[in-house]
Image (cartoon, helix red, strand yellow):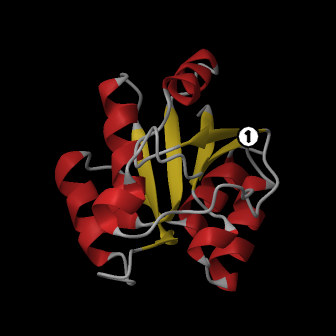
Amino acid sequence: MQQVLLIVDVQSTFSPPEWLVDGIRLLSASIPAVASVELHDEQVTPFQRQLGWHPASEDECLVEVDHVFVKHGYGQTSEAIAHLKQMGVERVLVCGMQTETCVLAAGFALFDAGLCPTLVTDLTVGSSLDRSGKLGIDLWKHHFGNVTSRAEVMAQLMLAGQ
């Protein structure tokens, strides 16, 4: 199965736990990977004005990937979606920070673009509202159905000889 890993906002701004970064690094070493990083631009997304906080204006993905897309809000950019579609993958594995917000928003963008988003449930962390990510995982299952784990993906890769 042709697949790609989309890593959502695993950057210093959001203080990802070390286990998350390490787990994503292990998986991203086995399949093509792209990432998004969220940067602040108040002219694009009014984080400070509406929420009283904002992500950093400069930051970088903490995992080495094939391509990084900068975004200025919750959703993925049209460039990121176009890139993923051009790859011709059967599914997009999604992991990262803020399961019930930015990760879920990525799922909607992928789904709306005709791609098959699949959440890697043990490589995601929720927001401060729910660090476990359970709310986001439940929402993902409800809207998209497709979830997996890092172990399941690695087992599939081994069976396929990758």
Q: Residue at x 38, y 83 (%)?
A: 132
Decide: is 114 above or below 32.
Answer: above
Q: Measuring from the top left, give residue 108's x and y in whole percent.
A: 31, 39
31 with respect to 76 (left or right): right
Q: Residue at x 35, y 47 (%)?
A: 105
Q: Residue at x 77, y 60 (%)?
A: 63
Which image quadrant for residue 56? bottom right
Decide: is 138 above or below 19.
Answer: above
Q: Measuring from the top left, give residue 119's x and y in whole percent.
A: 43, 55
Residue at the disc numbered 1: 32
Front in this rendered view, residue 8 or 37: 37
Q: Residue at x 68, y 50 (%)?
A: 157
Q: Residue furthest left?
A: 142
Decide: is 140 above or below 160.
Answer: below
Q: Residues within 10 Å of mark 1 (few under 14, many from 20)?
A: some
Which image quadrant for residue 70? top right
For badge 1, the amino acid type reads Pro
Front in this rendered view, residue 15 or 154: 15
Q: Secondary structure at mark 1?
A: loop
Q: Measuring from the top left, give residue 76's x and y in whole percent.
A: 47, 38
Q: Measuring from the top left, give residue 152's x and y in whole percent.
A: 54, 62
Q: Quadrant of the N terminus?
A: top right
Decide: is 22 above or below 98.
Answer: below
23 with respect to 93 (left or right): right
Q: Quadrant of the C terminus?
A: top right
Front in this rendered view, residue 144 or 106: 106
